[in-house]
Amino acid sequence: MAHKILFIEDDPGLQKALCESLKDAGYEVLCALDGEEGLRLAQRDIPDVVLLDLILPKKDGFEVLKEIRGDSRTASIPVIVLTNLEGSSEVQKALERGATAYLVKTNYELSEVIEKIGEVLKK
């Protein structure tokens, strides 16, 4: 059975590209364009990994992360933050709220993001 990845990202171009790459890599993929939808999918479908942007409409990524960690059904799901926010305060805040990893979009190719997901799933 394929691992289920939830990608919460408001950039439709990036979302489409990464979702297609994840599907090609054999993952089942759920995609959300805003934080509210992403949280709803996380709670309904209980993915194996959440890939989360921080700057999102309706509910930002920090709030989504906090709610995922605060719900017993989703608390143990690894969350990889994938964002353009590079400041040390954002990194620290995300890690303090329970992010498994913090990736800056501009520093990673799609293939490297998929590789990181594979590493997290093996733990």
Image: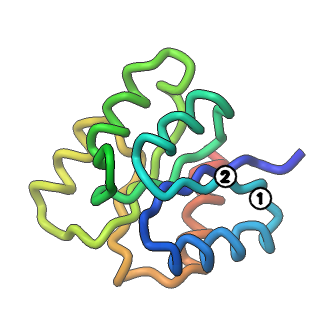
Q: Residue at coordinates 50% horizontally, 15% vertically from top-left?
A: 72
Nearer-the-camera pick, 33 or 75 = 33
Mark 1: amino acid: Tyr
Q: In the image, residue 116 lies at what x, y percent?
A: 55, 64
Furthest-right residue in this view: 1
Q: In the image, residue 113 lies at what x, y percent?
A: 54, 71
Residue 66: numbered disc: none
Relative side of 1 to 89, left or right: right
Nearer-the-camera pick, 47 or 11 = 11
Relative side of 107 to 86, left or right: right
Q: Nearer the viewer, mark 2 or mark 1?
A: 2
Colour theme: rainbow
Residue 30: numbered disc: 2
Looking at the rendering, in which quadrant would you find the C terminus? top right
Q: Residue at coordinates 66% horizontally, 68% vertically from top-left?
A: 19
Q: Are marks 2 and 1 in contact (CB under 8 Å)?
A: no
Query: With respect to residue 23, does 122 lie above or below?
Result: above
Assign a secondary structure to mark 2: strand
Q: Which residue is mark 1?
A: 27
Mark 2: amino acid: Leu
Looking at the rendering, in which quadrant would you find the N terminus? top right
Q: Mark 2 and mark 1: span between their CA atoms?
A: 10 Å
Q: Residue at coordinates 57% horizontally, 28% vertically from top-left?
A: 43
Picture quadrant where residue 77 is located: top right
Relative side of 97 to 117, left or right: left
Q: Residue at coordinates 65% horizontally, 41% vertically from top-left?
A: 48
Furthest-front residue in this view: 58
Nearer-the-camera pick, 97 or 35 = 35
Query: With respect to residue 106, does 39 lie above or below?
Result: above
